[in-house]
Amino acid sequence: MNQKTAFITGATSGIGKATAQLFARNKIRLILCGRRIERLIRLKEELSNLTDVTTLQFDVRNKKEVFNAIESLPTAFQKIDILINNAGNAHGLSSIQDGELDDWDAMIDINVKGLLYVSKAILPKMVERNDGFIVNIGSIAGKEVYPHGNVYCASKHAVNALNKAMRVDLNNYNIRVSAIHPGAVETEFSEVRFKGDVEKARKVYTGFKALQAEDIADIIYFVISRPYYVNIEDLIVYPTAQASATILNKE
């Protein structure tokens, strides 16, 4: 079997990093993308003894950076077999009337437009080859709306819709498209949402066992490693203690 190449956005932490580590152990070649160059360098050093690795530093919100970075890929990494659209964030947890415009812009620009920019830059070659796999990392927030989730939920509902639209539009080109929608995952996510308030972020995960980034990475690998005729369209993943976005069985 030909060695596959995976392009992972948001690879410097959380689900993206765990996925990169698991893919490397399974000899998938890696294009690791993120904004934090020091973390990219460290991750490349860690994984280069397992597989071929290259890195791209760019902000998915910046259309020009996205296209320039992807066009700059070395020849050996230009055939991208698997795209993991993982970059995403939440900013703030406010009611709609109290929300901050900068927070709204950040969530829409990263979660929706960033996903679209990266996909647009990579898809034409997949279409040309009639081959490829896109995995979009959504959220339970893309399946329901909860108090103070408003714009974040809207952005993840958009990811859910785009996942379905991609699958429809790319069906004639033999391209698989899948989405994974996690519930509570213990990563840096809550620190970003609470703007660096570590204490408040920790409280989100107290009283129950949250999902870990490695759990989602395992699922991503399962999805991409099925026979090519199998496309796992849509997965919602909760920790056992969670029944919905707002119902948690805490001790």
Image (cartoon, grey):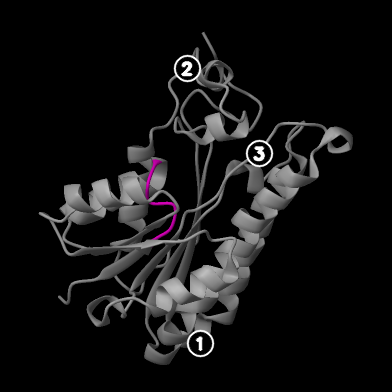
Q: Which residue is disc 2 drawn over?
A: 208
> What numbered label is drawn on residue 91?
3
The answer to which of 153 and 245 lies nearer the viewer is 153
Three-letter code, disc 3: His
Above or below: residue 90 compared with residue 120: above
Q: Position of residue 121 (x, y in %)?
A: 50, 77
Callout 2: SS: loop
Magenta residues? 8-13
Q: Which residue is disc 1 drawn over?
A: 172
How many residues crowd mark 2 within 10 Å: few (<14), some (14–19), many (20+)? some
* Quarter location, residue 199: top right
- Measured in 3D between alpha carbons, the distance from the residue under mark 2 to the one under mark 3, in whole angstroms, is 23 Å
Residue at left offset 51%, top offset 87%: 172
Three-letter code, disc 1: Asn
Does the rendering let one see residue 219? Answer: no
Q: Is residue 200 left or right of residue 224?
A: right
Does the rendering let one see residue 237? Answer: yes
* Quarter location, residue 129: bottom left
Residue at left offset 50%, top offset 23%: 241
> What numbered label is drawn on residue 15?
none
Q: Nearer the viewer, mark 3 or mark 1?
A: 3
Q: Position of residue 55 (x, y in %)?
A: 31, 62
Residue at left offset 31%, top offset 54%: 222
Three-letter code, disc 2: Phe
Q: Earlier in the sequence, mark 1 or mark 2?
A: 1
- Measured in 3D between alpha carbons, the distance from the residue under mark 3 to the one under mark 1, in whole angstroms, is 37 Å
Q: Position of residue 192 (x, y in %)?
A: 56, 35
